[in-house]
Amino acid sequence: MTEHIVKSFDTELQRLDGEIQRMGEIAVAQLEAAMDVLQRRDSQAAQRVVANDDAIDALEHEVGHDVLQLLALRQPMARDLREVYAALRISSDIERIGDYAANVAKRSMVLNQMPVVPAGRGLPALARLAGSLVSEALEAYRLRDADRAMAVRGRDAELDAEYTGLFRELLTYMAEDPRQITACTHLLFIAKNIERIGDHATNIAENTWFLVHGEPPATEREKRDRTSEQA
Amino acid sequence: MTEHIVKSFDTELQRLDGEIQRMGEIAVAQLEAAMDVLQRRDSQAAQRVVANDDAIDALEHEVGHDVLQLLALRQPMARDLREVYAALRISSDIERIGDYAANVAKRSMVLNQMPVVPAGRGLPALARLAGSLVSEALEAYRLRDADRAMAVRGRDAELDAEYTGLFRELLTYMAEDPRQITACTHLLFIAKNIERIGDHATNIAENTWFLVHGEPPATEREKRDRTSEQA
């Protein structure tokens, strides 16, 4: 055995892949944990979720660092270059997903200072759907399966429909009981965070498509949050 | 004159720079236009602002394309590589800023279907501050002036303080007049969009710092939206 093993480009790419899969797993777990502490009204655990976001940020820095090294030392071309490019973009989407999950946990701490509002009942289902979109997008990326990735985009429309329903429901609650306005506003922002997580899952899917095919997916996705267009 | 002029790396970098400056100018103009149509309650003009966002998206694609070409053909190292990396990241921040501006315009159309609410009076000042942060961050990037870039980060704290004040004001309005809840919710989301634009200005500033110094700025910035921590 030689002490120094010359690593192949593939090995380094696998390393990058591993970092991204780890980032993705943490982000999905963070979303689940955030929803869990929200429902259990556990501010101490929420604090830990907020603190854990650092792990995702650190991994994003690592990916950025590795990408720069890889570009400088390996000078990849064509598909290899797209691999590196996609890794960079996808890591940035996962970082945003982590931020949104942390923001859910942060808002849960504010909600714990107020009486329980029943209006947030639709949130766990919304978050489960968003989490499954992220997992599915990451799995499609891991397999470099462009068609599977594109299925995520379709399912994001479901998420947006659910979000829109929840948005209206929360507005109704607020009108019926103005004492719940502050709490419901935080629930609205939590719902919006979850909806945005779905958008980033779609971004991951689109970057996977680009990685495989060398061009962006043909049809522009529709803008999905229709609450910004509706009264 | 020869017909084919071999372009230097610097020339290509200048082209990239030009694309980003153009993206940035459009994004700032889009924010101003969005605030203008919001105040004038002009849904037709708002529709144009929403449509104009495509120009920014197209430029982001161009930057991405040019970056990949530059990496493949020029194989830049060290500072040159960071130039390309920063261009990619900054273009993605500008694209997000454009999205937020378009979302403001979209929500203004919903608001035009409702009676005027006086609660949004603080928004223009908030948007002016956010726009000036973006312009300042882009100017610092253009000059590759890391210290000037870091001043943007400090001023983002001002924006966050203003946002927090506006957030509370809007909640108060909603409690006082529940008929305005839907309108005020859209104003809340508009305020949040503007606050997020400030975050992206800070990202541009931090990427400028990294580009110049080869490492991220020392002190982590504080999380700025304190409304997610407060009742």
Image (cartoon, coloured by chain):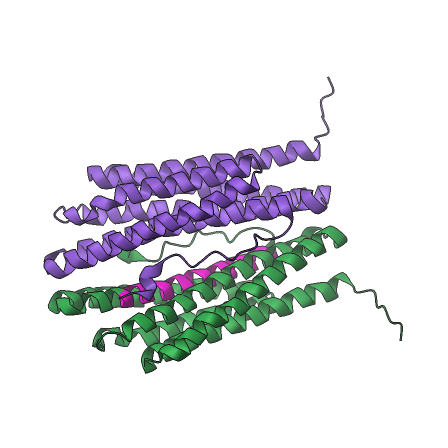
Chain colours: A purple, B green
Which of A71/A36 is in front? A36
Q: How many marks?
A: 0
Residue B41: name its quadrant.
bottom left
Residue A162 at least partly seen: yes
A124 lies left or right of B82: left
The magenta segment is: B186-212
Q: Quadrant of residue A51?
A: top left
Q: Position of residue A91 (x, y in %)?
A: 51, 45
The correct choice, above or below, for A43 with respect to B53 in the image is: above
Would residue A93 appear left or right of B79 to someone viewing this image?
left
Magenta span includes B192: yes
Relative placement, left or right, of A112 versus B20 is left
Residue B204 to residue A94: above or below:
below
Q: Is residue B54 left or right of residue B220?
A: right
Q: Nearer the viewer, residue A160 or B92?
A: A160
Quarter of the image for the C terminus of chain B: give it: bottom left
Percent coordinates x, y for residue B112 in the rendering: 29, 76
Please report the residue visible at 60 percent of the width from the left and 52 percent of the height from the top: B214
Q: Quadrant of the N terminus of chain B?
A: bottom right
> What secondary structure characterizes most of the magenta part?
helix
Q: Residue furthest right?
A: B2
Residue at the top extreme, as displayed: A1
Residue with the most extreme bottom position: B40
In the image, what residue occupies the spot 30% across and 68% down? B162
Check residue A204 for magenta coloring: no
The x, y position of residue B31, in whole percent, is 43, 73
Q: Is residue B231 visible?
A: no
Could you tell me residue A210's position as x and y percent? 60, 48
